[in-house]
């Protein structure tokens, strides 16, 4: 039987996600303007890592409890959802231009990380030393992004354009914007936690398996901060924050979350993930290359991505 309290958790979680997402996007874009750096850099780092915290918490908690299927299924499912659901829905709101830097730097890292994790998992386990290697990769990626932030300062006309978009008429209080980001992230995380707990309880009441819960409900639930942030960014025409959030989250999920989780406890990998979910995750990542080379993600492509994701969810549940 479904407990009504879990339905209340879901409703409160959705409210938290909406308000937290608004504060996060506004704070991130205004902080970028005040620092004179690209919103893409802010999106790939601060926003992406912050919105990936639910996946991190779920991964560590699942590893400690021995629920490895939820731990790795959550990461793989979240990366698929980030592109097939989040980017697709945002792309229906706005035709998304794809920054050339993403093709040169972040998207190859997503694809390389996906292949690396898949290769690590072929022996049926991601070990502690392999987790350490993934974390080292994340550290190197962040070093590259810090150097890029120092090098890619906004030009005066770009700063003025960003200030006009955010209705900035005076000096920006950076600490206030940092506080807005922190509060937004906190509200997002609480909202995601409430929503995931309610959704998982409902799924278990309906006797759905843990792996399916991990790849679908938990993955979508922990991706809700990215979803809300990206859709709000699309509505506010903050394309760099939108795309940076999705791509950066995928990198953080693979290198950071799987890395830390494997250090806590080696992660057994089910055959189903190797022959189905990993290839699907890599396939969705390769789509970014195709449209990245075209310079934009048109609405028809976003619709196809969404249909493909719906097909993946249906197959994952009925398989």
Image (spheres, helix red, strand yellow):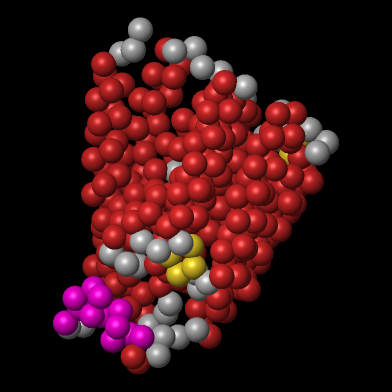
Q: Nearer the viewer, residue 83 or 31?
A: 83
- State left or right for residue 252 relative to residue 227: right
The single residue placed furthest to the bottom in the displayed view is 156
* The N terminus: image quadrant: top left
- State left or right for residue 62 relative to residue 239: right
Horizontal and vertical percent for residue 279?
70, 43
Magenta-span inclusion, residue 222: no
Residue 107 picture quarter:
bottom right
Q: Residue at x 29, y 60 (%)?
A: 235
Looking at the picture, does residue 287 appear above or below residue 218? below
* The C terminus: image quadrant: top right
Q: Residue at x 29, y 83 (%)?
A: 161
Residue 160 picture quarter:
bottom left
Horizontal and vertical percent for residue 144?
61, 73
Looking at the picture, does residue 179 appear above or below residue 147? above
Residue 165 picture quarter:
bottom left
Q: Residue at x 43, y 24 (%)?
A: 200
Q: Which residues are magenta?
A: 158-169
Q: Nearer the viewer, residue 64 or 122?
A: 122
Horizontal and vertical percent for residue 173?
23, 75
Looking at the picture, does residue 54 appear above or below residue 98? above
- State left or right for residue 187 relative to residue 44: left
Q: Residue at x 56, y 75 (%)?
A: 101
Picture mark count: 0
């Amino acid at each position: 039987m479904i407990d009504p309290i879990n339905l209340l958790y879901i409703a409160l979680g959705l409210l938290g996600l909406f308000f937290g997402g608004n504060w996060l996007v506004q704070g991130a874009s205004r902080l970028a303007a005040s620092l004179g750096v690209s919103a893409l850099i802010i999106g790939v780092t601060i926003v992406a890592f912050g919105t990936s915290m639910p996946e991190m918490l779920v991964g560590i908690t699942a590893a400690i409890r021995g629920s490895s299927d939820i731990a790795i299924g959550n990461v793989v499912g979240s990366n698929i959802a980030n592109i097939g659901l989040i980017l697709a829905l945002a792309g229906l709101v706005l035709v998304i231009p794809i920054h050339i830097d993403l093709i040169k730097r972040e998207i190859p890292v997503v694809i390389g990380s996906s292949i690396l994790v898949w290769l690590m998992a072929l022996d049926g386990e991601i070990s502690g030393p392999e987790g350490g290697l993934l974390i080292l990769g994340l550290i190197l990626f962040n070093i590259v992004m810090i150097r890029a932030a120092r090098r890619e300062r906004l030009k005066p006309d770009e700063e003025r354009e960003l200030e006009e978009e955010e209705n900035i008429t005076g000096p920006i209080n950076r600490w206030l914007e940092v506080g807005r980001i922190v509060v937004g992230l906190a509200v997002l995380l609480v909202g995601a936690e409430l929503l995931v707990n309610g959704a998982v309880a409902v799924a278990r009441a309906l006797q759905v398996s843990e792996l399916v819960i991990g790849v679908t409900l938990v993955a979508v639930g922990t991706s809700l901060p990215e979803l809300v942030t990206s859709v709000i960014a699309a509505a506010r025409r903050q394309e760099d924050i939108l795309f940076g959030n999705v791509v950066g989250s995928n990198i953080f999920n693979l290198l950071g979350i799987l890395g830390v989780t494997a250090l806590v406890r080696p992660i057994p990998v089910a055959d189903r993930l190797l022959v189905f979910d990993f290839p699907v995750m890599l396939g969705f990542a390769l789509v970014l290359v195709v449209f990245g080379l075209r310079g934009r993600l048109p609405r028809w492509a976003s619709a196809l991505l969404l249909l493909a994701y719906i097909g993946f969810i249906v197959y994952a549940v009925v398989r």
